[in-house]
Amino acid sequence: MTHSRQRGFGLVELMISVTLGLLLSAAVIQVFLASSTSSQIQDSLAQVQETGRFSMHFIAREVRMSGYMGCASRGLGRESEDNFRDAVEIIALPADAVNFTPQDMISGANDVGDDNAWGAQPGTDVLILRRGSDSNARIESATDDSATLVNISDNVAGFEQGDFVLLADCQKAAIFRVSNEPKKAGKGPTVLVHAEGEYNSQSRRNSGSFGPGAEILGLDEVRLFVRDTGRANDAGDPISSLFLRRRGVGGGGVLGAAIELVEGVENLQLLYGVDTNGDFSINQYLDASAISANPGVTPNWGQVVSVKAQLTVVANQGGVVGEDGSGDAQRVIDINGNAVANPDGRMRQVFTNVFALRNKLP
């Protein structure tokens, strides 16, 4: 009888095949992990750069428009404090809400404390800007000193009762509040009344007549700051954002609620370029705590002609880069040469730019 020989893998062959399989599996896992890490880094980098670009673009627009007064911006924004006050009549109330001179077009707060008025992150800065609004209308017929109202062909700007209004031509301006309820946009000719009482200190303007074509703009106040959103990422790390509060057209003269602009802004630091000798060049950069609200003191807010903004932006996903103390810790430096802390392994980047206040420059 013939017996067939059994054939199969020997122990050595089996061990070799298992070892090769493990090596191949390890290589595949390594490639997968590297690809996953690269994807996380790319996602975090894209988020950081998008947030930084949007935030800087928004801040740039608001800073450059600070002090805008329509046609009057060509001259009044560059006048001395006294000449400016002579050219701009303010009858709106309350007075501290409508100061609109070179001294009041921009201001800020430096390294705010825990219990600050804006709800901003402690240690961050706050920027406050005032300007004429993008929404505007033109008066329908000439108005003189005795007038207690302004005629407009249509309320295209959307003015409402209580709104702060800037009436300006190229030589002068007047600021009042709308005391009536004008027609809505698209409803035809209407009037903006500035009666004495709750909204205005007097009903008549003393600033002279304004001819047809004079501009009527809302008076905007913008406040920018960084605030904790109350949300957290998957690892429980807090998420902060750039926020905006605005008082403008259609708000009845009331400062609006804080609006979240963009997620991932961790810190806002500001320095202000000051022109102390009136030659429209910057003599020094100072933080808000070193600038006086008194126009008779140097340096003061009326001498600020530019803003240097620094944003620290952070991605949401943790564990993407090395934390402080690790061998592969991410090293990010701010404009003062200080290392930005990284306690959570989230990617961070510092964005810095300088913006001129166009309406204060030749």
Image: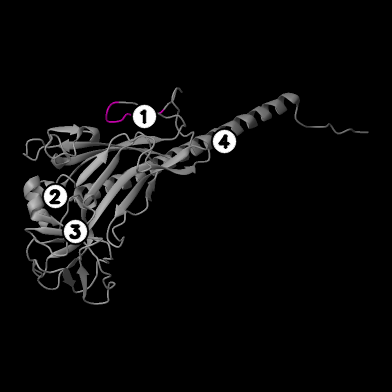
Which percent across, then down, holds residue 321? Answer: 44, 31
Would you say the residues marked 4 and 1 are in contact, meaning their CB atoms lie under 8 Å apart?
A: no
Asked whether the beta carbons under mark 1 and mark 3 sit within 8 Å of each other, the answer is no
How far is disc 1 from disc 2 in space, using C-alphas? 34 Å
Quadrant of the frame with the N terminus: top right
The image shows residue 171 at horizontal and vertical percentages of 6, 58
> Whole-Å distance between the Cαs marked 4 and 3?
78 Å
Q: Is residue 334 magenta?
A: yes
Q: Could you tell me the amino acid type at mark 2?
A: Asn
Nearest the eye: 208 or 7: 208
Q: Disc 2 or disc 4, which is closer to the eye?
A: 2
Is 271 drawn above or below residue 214 in the view shown?
Answer: above
Determine if the magenta segment contains residue 181. no
Q: Earlier along the polypeptide chain: callout 4 or callout 3?
A: 4
Reading the image, the residue beneath label 1 is 340
Q: Which of marks 2 and 1 precedes in the sequence?
A: 1
Magenta-drawn stretch, dominant element (helix, strand or loop): loop
Q: Measured from the top left, where is residue 219 in percent x and y? A: 22, 57
**Comes first in the chain, label 1 or label 3:** 3
- Of badges 4 and 3, the one in the foreground is 3
Residue on which the image places disc 3? 201
**Secondary element at tag 4:** helix
Q: CA distance from mark 4 to mark 1?
A: 36 Å
Which element carries disc 3, helix, strand or loop? loop
SS at mark 2? helix
Q: Which residue range is magenta in the image?
A: 330-337
Q: Earlier in the sequence, mark 4 or mark 1?
A: 4
Q: Residue at the spot x=32%, y=26% of the render?
A: 338
